[in-house]
């Protein structure tokens, strides 16, 4: 019997040790798989959050650019109202004409306020270049309309038309670029003399 135990016991112990080592290896492997799974899930969550953040930023930018488009349109319309009021100017200026003229200048002031609010968002959300172009357009349009209203002279608008048109197109191009939309607006050197820049 001793001989049996002598021959069986080492083989048994070796087999037991192999099973124990295999079991430990499996446990290590399970731990490693769990660690990899945890890291993978964390990476997925981070990527998902980054994509969500980028999407929300793009949506904010899109809404801001829509607001800026409306503000530019209101400003252009109000400037043309002032111009139209001056084109039908009566001599001597009647009370009726003065009411219409003051309504047009007030509409321009109101449009300027809306534009400035939208411009602030451009400064926050868009590139420095887009913000600068919007600012340049705003200054030019305000200067032209103020001078036109002060002098009551339509020629002020006519003389500044080309410069305003170019600045308008530069703003549109910059805002389209901010949204990643391919450029389809006329090039800055193309003729815009045949009417409103828009």
Image (cartoon, grey):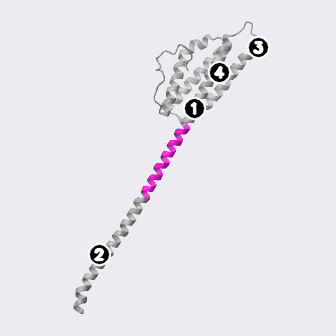
Residue at which label 1 appears: 66
Residue depicted at x 50% and y 33%: 179
Q: Earlier in the sequence, mark 4 or mark 1?
A: 1
Is the residue 136 above or below the residue 98 in the image? below
Query: Helix, strand, or loop for circle 4?
Result: helix
Residue at which label 3 appears: 96
Q: Earlier in the sequence, mark 2 or mark 3?
A: 2
Q: Left or right: 100 with respect to 117?
A: right
Instruction: Give the spatial CA distance, label 4 vs label 3.
Output: 19 Å
Residue 60 in view here:
yes
- The circle drawn on residue 18 is 2
Q: Earlier in the sequence, mark 2 or mark 4?
A: 2
x, y percent for residue 68: 58, 30
When asked about the image quadrant of residue 198, the answer is: top right
Instruction: Give the spatial CA distance, label 4 vs label 1.
Output: 18 Å
Residue at which label 4 appears: 78
Residue 15 belongs to magenta span: no
Is the residue 185 above or below the residue 158 in the image? below
Count neighbours of disc 3 (C-alpha within 10 A) and say few if under 14, some if 14 to 19, many if 20 or more: few
- Residue 13 or 120: which is nearer the viewer? 13
Count neighbours of disc 4 (C-alpha within 10 A) and say few if under 14, some if 14 to 19, many if 20 or more: many
Instruction: Give the spatial CA distance, label 2 vs label 1.
Output: 71 Å
Q: Are marks 1 and 3 in contact (CB under 8 Å)?
A: no
- Residue 117 or 28: which is nearer the viewer? 28
- Residue 194 or 25: which is nearer the viewer? 194
Q: Are marks 2 and 4 in contact (CB under 8 Å)?
A: no
x, y percent for residue 131: 53, 30
Instruction: Give the spatial CA distance, label 2 vs label 4.
Output: 89 Å
Count neighbours of disc 2 (C-alpha within 10 A) and say few if under 14, some if 14 to 19, many if 20 or more: few
Q: Earlier in the sequence, mark 4 or mark 3?
A: 4
Range shown magenta:
38-60
């Amino acid at each position: 019997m001793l001989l049996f135990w002598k021959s069986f016991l080492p083989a048994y112990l070796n087999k037991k040790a192999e099973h124990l080592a295999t079991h430990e290896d499996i446990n290590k492997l399970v731990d490693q798989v769990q660690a990899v799974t945890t890291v993978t899930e964390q990476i997925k969550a981070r990527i998902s959050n980054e994509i969500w953040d980028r999407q929300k930023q793009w949506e904010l930018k899109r809404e801001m650019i829509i607001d800026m488009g409306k503000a530019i349109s209101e400003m252009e319309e109000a400037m043309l109202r002032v111009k139209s009021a001056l084109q039908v100017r009566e001599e001597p200026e009647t009370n009726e004409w003065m009411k219409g003229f003051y309504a047009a200048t007030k509409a321009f002031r109101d449009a300027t306020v809306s534009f400035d609010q939208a411009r602030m968002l451009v400064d926050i959300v868009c590139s420095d270049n887009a913000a600068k172009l919007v600012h340049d357009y705003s200054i030019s349009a305000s200067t032209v309309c103020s001078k036109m209203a002060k002098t009551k002279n339509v020629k002020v608008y006519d003389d500044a038309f080309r410069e305003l048109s170019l600045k308008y197109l530069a703003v549109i191009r910059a805002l389209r670029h901010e949204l990643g939309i391919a450029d389809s607006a006329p090039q800055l050197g193309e003729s815009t003399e045949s009417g409103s820049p828009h």
